Structures are given as structure tokens and as C-alpha cells.
Amino acid sequence: MNPEPQPPTLLVIGGGPAGHAAATVAATLGASVTVVEDRIVGGAAHLLDCIPSKAMVASSMRMSAIRNASALGISDPGAVRLDMARLCAHLDGITTTLAASLRDMLESQDVEIVEGRGRFTGPHSAVVVRPDGSEVETTFDHALISTGSRPRIPDWAPVDGERVLTTRHAYDLAELPEKLIVIGSGVTGVEMVHIFSSLGSEVTLLVSRHHVLPHRDPEVAVVLEDVFLGRGVGLVKGSRASAVTRTADGVLVETDDGRRLEGSHVLLAVGSVPNSEALGLDEVGIETSRGFVVVDEFQRTSIPHIYAAGDVTGQLPLSSVATMQGRKVARHVMGRSVRPLDYRKVAQAIFTEPEIASVGLEEVDAAAEGRKVRITKVPFAANPRALIQGNPAGFVKVVSDPATRIVLGGTVVGHHASELIAPIALAVRARLRVEVLAETLLVHPSLVESISEAAE
């Protein structure tokens, strides 16, 4: 009598969005799954960056709304005071609850969770170094590297977690920084500026280029910079930080063009680096580039039965992307049909005030490619709901093909842009024509009707 075939084994190193999603789907499809995680199920980048930052955004937006209530006829909304300790406790409670829920979900699917750090010892073997230093050997049919990334710390910045901070120190502060200098004007940098300027810090943003968000639509940068300036944020443009020094009661930031900026704290938002060291990648012949794991369109590494997903690959660094990559890896491991992920059709959002969201082809990309497109734009200043709510800043922009009228992309800058981008994302994904958006009957008054107006 022939023995029953054993289910394929999947070793997941890193329990972040990619690893957790892969483990869940693979287990559902019948694989025997082991997840190795040395910190927190759910991922450090997800639970220690993404989630707490958005929770702080929620608090900052409440404070902004209260401060601006007089514009809506509320003359005395009362004193607004931030309790930093309670806010940080709120953030910690959210991450603790989410991590516990994710662990419970994995365990309910019979996924084995091993605490420690994984390291490959061969093409089908690995060792897990436990917190106490002991080692556990394991073998696998397939493996997934999903170890994420961490904030980049330049040599000239002596990060101490007290005055010189990375983003991960921003969610556990004893008190609100009185005078904060933010270095880095990309997505993370502008979100940090929004959060702390809304909460009451005096903020200066060091911008190395001519405007914030240098790789995005310039019209987006104009709107955001106007809001920052109106809130009293200092914008220092065309300068790069070259040194950070602790002083008796704060920090000193020096730039490459000779400027000297003094503050109580400095926060670094200058990119991230992959967590790929100490995984034994070189020993087993897994190709990397600048520390990032090289993968093909199915997330396979140079060893085909070993996959990589999430920030460690250097692809689009979004939790949503990592999650989708993880799901696709699990399906591919289990022999199911999988379509490569189209990164051009990924919806992205920046949680500032106003929010910024985009999907598909942006106007700046079309111009760079010399591609002919049709651009239609509607400002929220013409939207009744935006005026009612007192949030008229921003616009909706729809990009379409002038020949086929298919929606190629879009940008939303405004209140709830991260939610409003959904119909444009669906149109891009489904290759809908602009008249489908234009002829969809939406609620009036609503913010989303500006999308159908732009399509019209």
C-alpha cells in the first residue's frame, strides 16, 4: 500500500505582511508552513512604522479639525492639549492587539511560529537561532524570504533615540518635540512633518531638491507646500544634511552649503535598507543587488524554489504590495495559476493633510515618456461637499488615452484621497473607458463625484 503523499513544506523567514499573507494562503491550500520571526508577528515595518504613523495621523487630524472649527461656526471649541503619553500608549495598544490577532490567525491554521532568526545552510535547509542562542535545524521544500527593511542611518547622524531619531522612535516619545528638524522630503518625511506640525511642534523640513516629493506630480508638491507654509512649517530647500550633533539642550544640523539649523530634536527620513544580512544568502548562492534580493516576476530568487517578497526585494515598498506578493508566492508554491503583479496599477497614498493618492500613469510619467495622454482636472474648491466640510484644498486628475479613452491613471489630492482613489484604481485595473466613470451616478453632495466630473 503506497503511503499518502506529504504536503509540501514552506519555510517563511519573516512574519511581516508578505510572510504572514504567504503563510495564511499556503496553509489554506494545504501546505505545511513554518514562520520564523524574531520580533513581532505582523512585521516591524508594518506594525512599528505604517500602523502607528497612521494612528498618529488620525490624532493630528482631530487636533487640526478642532483648531479650525471656527471656520464652521464653532466659535469656542475649547482648549486643545496633547497628552503624548496617552497617545503613545494608544499606539502601543493598537500594535499589540494587531500582533496578537495575526498570531492567533496563523496558529488557528496550524502554522508553526518559531521565535528567532533564520539562516540558510543549504538549498533545502536552514537553522533558526533562538533568542537564548540555541539553534534549531530545519528543512523545507520551498522558502520565502520576507525580512523587510529598516530605516537608513547615515554615518553623519548619531541616532540615540532621544534627540536624534528615526521614524521608529517617533511613536514612543516622552514629550512632544518643541522644535523638530525633519531630514528627508519624500513620503515618510512629509508625513512626519504633517503629524508633528499638527500636534503642535515647530517644524523645519530640510528639502534637498527644489520641492517636496521630488518624484511625484509637481502640482501635488505645490498644494502640500502651501499647506505646510500656512501652518508655519519652515522649508529649507536645496540643502543636504552633512552632520548632526547633539548640543547641551538639543541638536545642530549642518548642511553641505554651510547652513546651521538648531532644534530640540531631529528626525531622519532618508530611506531604508534591506534586512538581508546574516541570512546566509551568499553561502547558498542567492543573488542580491545593493543588499536587496533579486527576484523574477513570480518573486523567485536565483534559486527557483526560494522566493523573496516585500521590502527586502527593493520593489515598491508598500505593505499592500508585500501582502499581494506573499499571496502570489503561496499560490505559485502550490502550483496554482499566478499572474505577475503589475506595479503600475498599484494605488498609493500619502497621509498628509490634504491626503495624496495616485494610481497608474501620472502626468509627470507621461511627459517623461513622451506619451500622448488626455488630462482632465477638477479642483475640490468647486465641490459642494468639500466646501461644506471646510476642506477645499486639492484636486482630482484623471489621465486617459485620447484614442481609446481608456483610463490610464489618476491623482487625488484632498480630504480622504486614500479612499477616493478606489474607483480610479478599479478603472485602471479593469481598463475601463472614461465614460464609465463619467456616467456612474454617485451621491450628491459627495467628494467622489469630482471623479465623475473629471472623467466627464
Image (tube, grey):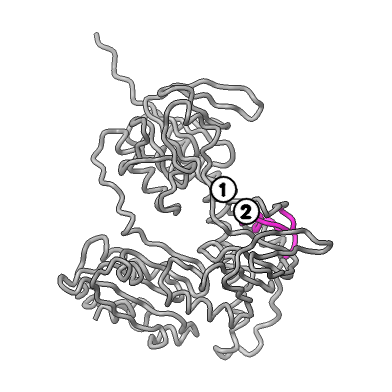
* Contact between labelled residues 2 and 1, with CB atoms less than 8 Å apart: yes
Question: 24 and 241: which one is in front?
Answer: 241
Question: 262 and 200: which one is in front?
Answer: 262
Above or below, comparing residue 7 to residue 80 in the picture: above
Question: 393 and 365: which one is in front?
Answer: 365
Label 2 element class: helix
The percent coordinates of residue 81 (x first, y second) are 71, 73
Question: 432 and 286: which one is in front?
Answer: 286
Q: Which residue lies furthest to the left in this view?
A: 403
Q: Is disc 1 surrounded by few (<14), some (14 to 19) or many (20+) residues within 10 Å? A: some
Q: Is the magenta stretch mostly helix, strand or loop?
A: loop
Q: Which mark is residue 150?
A: 1
Q: What stretch is highlighted in magenta?
A: 161-176
Any magenta on residue 162?
A: yes
Q: Which amino acid does label 2 sit on?
A: Arg
Name the quadrant of the N terminus: top left
The percent coordinates of residue 419 (x first, y second) are 40, 68
**Residue drawn 57% across and 91% down?**
73
- Residue 156 vs residue 107: left or right? right
**Residue drawn 46% across and 75% down?**
415
Q: Which amino acid does label 1 sit on?
A: Arg
Query: Which quadrant would residue 374 be assigned to in this image?
Result: bottom left
Query: Which quadrant would residue 26 be assigned to in this image?
Result: top left
Please state which of the two labelled residues, at mark 1 or mark 2, is closer to the viewer. Answer: 1
Marks 1 and 2 sit apart, C-alpha to C-alpha, by 9 Å
- Residue 28 vs residue 387: left or right? left
Q: Which of marks 1 and 2 is nearer the N terminus?
A: 1
Label 1 element class: strand
The percent coordinates of residue 166 (x first, y second) are 64, 55
Q: Which mark is residue 299?
A: none
**Residue drawn 47% across and 71% down?**
355
According to the picture, the residue beneath numbered tag 2 turns out to be: 168
